[in-house]
Image (spheres, helix red, strand yellow):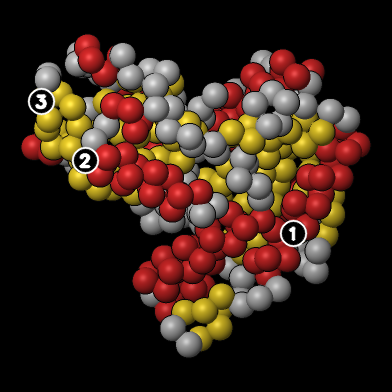
Amino acid sequence: MFKVPIAVVQQLVPGWLFDVDVQGRFHGVYGPKECPEEWFHWVGRQVIEVWPPETSMTLHQAFAQLLDHVAPTVKATRAVLPLNGGYDFFAMSVFYLPETDDCQTPLSRFLVWIQPEREASEDLFQMAFFDALTGLANRRLLYDHITQAVRASSRIRQWGAVLFLDLDGFKQINDQWGHAAGDDVLRQVAHRLTQAVRKTDTVARLGGDEFVLLLHHLDVTKDTAMNGLRYVTDHVLKLLSDKAFVWRLDPVRLSASVGAVLFNGHNAEHLNADELIRQADAAMYQAKMAGKNTSHIALALMPAATSDAQNFVQNQTNGA
């Protein structure tokens, strides 16, 4: 159960994508153009059975390297693969996108993207779904993740959450040290945010100094899910504000304002990603008005709901 939208991938990325599990077994092959017939026969078989030993070893080494990282990463290399009774050279990139099934069992599955070397553009997939500066998910991938999370929540009645984060005083960093400093601090922020959540959650950058976190499977009960969400927001605020960032040798102090909305299948099955992010953004502005370095938590409501007094159910301040 991948978070990557395969249909979108087929439109954006030339070449072919293989769905492969951590044991090296093929589960599917996808592509925008005709696939060599012999490749379809790989489904259900092990990579080592059908690929040359050197390429199989390269793939498994990439799996091991990617599993050591929290954020989705890319391992690009050259591969020799069977084609039409012979062999050809391909550019191969491997993408690890952590996920859980409906029983919250961790899954380790990979997308293996291959493309003839003469057509290869190693950055194309990365540009389509990941932020160029931080390597986090971009808006396109985030929206697909939220859509899938809401559908899963509707099926299994697990609560999830969307957090909208805006850095406090980030403009002063650019003004004082320049945009190179600002970019470096944003990369440091991205690293800390990935440490604040589970591998199965999503950390995305919308642009500028705005980030979004998507939390899956918090709990089946609202109170426990709310406590879990409160813990994450507290943890995020502390990770960003307790220890200074560093630009060259200068300490850089930052905090954040966080707005969060809690959803499950009962109250969000008709909500889309735009609406959930809009409500989380509105909660973030409530945190800004409360003094910054603060989180504001809300229950997601249908768009027709107009009363903020009914919507916002929890406001917590952390050293504003």
Viewer-proximal residue, 215 or 260?
215
Element under disc 2:
strand
Residue holding disc 2: 79
Residue 225's x, y, as percent? 83, 38
**Residue 187 in view, yes or no:** yes
Residues under numbered marks 3 and 1 in contact, where contact means CB atoms less than 8 Å apart: no
Element under disc 3:
strand
**Residue 300 in view, yes or no:** no
* Residue 70 in the image: above or below residue 23: below
Task: Tell me the mark number nearer the camera, choosing from 3 and 1.
Answer: 3
Viewer-proximal residue, 278 or 199?
199
Using the rendered view, name the quadrant where residue 297 is placed: top right
Q: Looking at the image, is mark 3 or mark 2 earlier in the sequence?
A: 2
Label 2 neighbour load within 10 Å: few <14, some 14-19, many 20+: many
Residue holding disc 3: 86
Label 1 neighbour load within 10 Å: few <14, some 14-19, many 20+: some
Q: CA distance from mark 1 to mark 2?
A: 42 Å
Q: CA distance from mark 3 to mark 1?
A: 54 Å
Residue holding disc 1: 235
* Residue 236 in the image: above or below residue 284: below
Viewer-proximal residue, 265 or 104?
104
* Residue 102 in the image: above or below residue 278: above
